[in-house]
Image (tube, grey):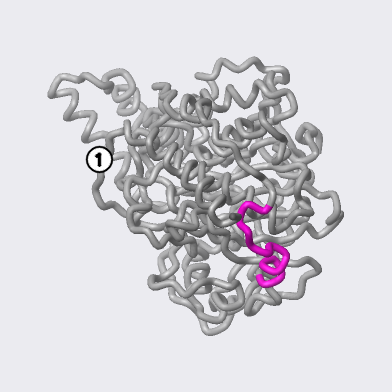
Amino acid sequence: MGKLQDWSITTCLFLFFLHASQIHCTCQSHVRNRLYRSKRGIGSSIDTSHLNAIRRLSVSLSLQNISGVNQQEQKERDLIENLPGQPSVNFKQYGGYVTVNESAGRSLYYYFVEATITKNSSPLVLWLNGGPGCSSLYGAFQELGPFRVHSDNKTLYTNPYSWNNVANMLFLESPAGTGFSYTNTTTDMENPGDMKTAADNYVFLVKWLERFPEYKGRDFYIAGESYAGHYVPQLAQTILVHNKNQTFINLRGILIGNPSLGKDDMGGYEFLASRGFVPEETFLRYKKSCGHDNPPDVATFCMDTSLNFEDILENMNKYNILAHKCLNATLTNQSKECTTVMQSDPCGERYVEAYFNWDEVQRSMHVTKMPYTWTICSEALGYSYWNQTDYSASMLPILKELMKHDQLRVWVFSGDTDAVISVTVTMYALKMMNLTAVTEWLPWFSEGQVGGFTEEYRGNFRFATVRGAGHEVPLYKPKAALTLFKHFILNSPLPLTP
């Protein structure tokens, strides 16, 4: 009965969202995608199809043991005794699979680390990386988790600014086909999109909380970066829809960094011009002349200028314009001396990929043997395969809807040296929301230094920049990122004095 019920629940969710997504047209071509394509930002068009689909959702879920599996035994099997090469720690960590659709054989991989203090009351935070199709294990082992990978790809070192100093951190590889997550049904990989992902992520949470019932009722937050600017608010909206029947997941807020909120090129190009990468007059002409309907001569100028902008980015680290590109990703026999989280290695993602393709690591993390190499981002789920209507849809209506919930806070932060989804792009998006400021634009501080600038708006909405941080803020500015995260969890203003 449990398995049959589980099949019907997940299948109904999948079919509902699949039906809604079939009204979209998709143009596909094979292009390598990492965290986010540089020309995709925020859009002015409002696509309400996802909102309407969520509102019409009326699937009734039984929230008690819907899988029919002995979840306590599964939890014990998921316990990670020790990761290869890890330092000693005072918290437990778990890794394993949650099947979100039994009939399709669709299972999502998670990695979970307990909070280091106040374990009985500290909140639960779900972290999602972007892409689409990029692994949250990158966030766990290169950004905000308790460990980072040495250049020897065999040993780990401690991140003293890990977010599990504040909360229990749950990292999810989603959608299926990302990282260690998989499906046994090939059609699951056809026309991937936002609504399928939101449905699976919700089912994952419900079933994960069966396995870890001590976290039911805890304050729950969703955080992420880049294309998680889609994932996070859509999952929050899905939770709130289901909570109308019964508050099963105690959602208290969302936190998204350098987020994809829609489509806009102009803000990104303005960022490059403001940093002196292109002549100001070139950008001003582009801004004045380039729109949707251009005469042929102007269209040629617009295309050539766009390609010039892209060429500039390809010659530098577009995820942090102040950081070096990785020029030599050769692994070392021994870890580099004096490696610290305060000096990010431009080749760090290569070490992470090598570490997770080590058989001993996969065994320790209870990974099903994969027929392919683990990569940070899945080519099969990248921009060129993603549902294009979903990809370019504006998330601003969903953010405004979330702001109507008095007990729910919405924070957006932006590293100000990111050229992929620049601070300029995000500020243009917020301007479109017609927010009402309740505090003036002021610097905020982290350990005596200016961490960035911040402004608070009516509706429990806050925007903050992070000074000197790139696309992955916790990677480049771990201290400031932890300060921001602490105050988000505490629901307190960022420090305005040193």
User: For the point 71% across and 51% down, which residue is it?
Assistant: 479
Instruction: Identify the residue at horizontal 50%, vertical 19% (top origin).
Output: 432
Most foreground residue, 172 or 345: 172
x, y percent for residue 100: 53, 53
The quarter of the displayed image where residue 371 is located: bottom left
Q: Which secondary structure, mark 1? A: loop
| Residue 453 in view, yes or no | no
In the figure, 312 relative to 69: above or below?
A: above
The reply, left or right, for residue 492 in relation to residue 254 is: right
Locate residue 21 relative to residue 152 in the image: left or right: left
* Image x and y of residue 297, in percent: 13, 24
Depth check, front residue: 138 or 69: 69
Q: Residues within 10 Å of mark 1 (few under 14, many from 20)?
A: few
Residue at 71%, 53% in the rendered image:
163
- Amino acid on which disc 1 is placed: Cys
> Which residue has dot 1 on it?
27
Residue at image location 55% in from the left, 36% down from the top: 59
Where 458 sits versus 65, above or below? above
Outermost residue toward the left? Answer: 296
Viewer-proximal residue, 187 or 223?
Answer: 187
Q: Quadrant of residue 372?
A: bottom left
Name the spot of residue 165 as percent of width and height, x first. 77, 55
Examine the rendered structure and indicate whether residue 351 appears above or below residue 188: below
Extent of the magenta region: 65-77
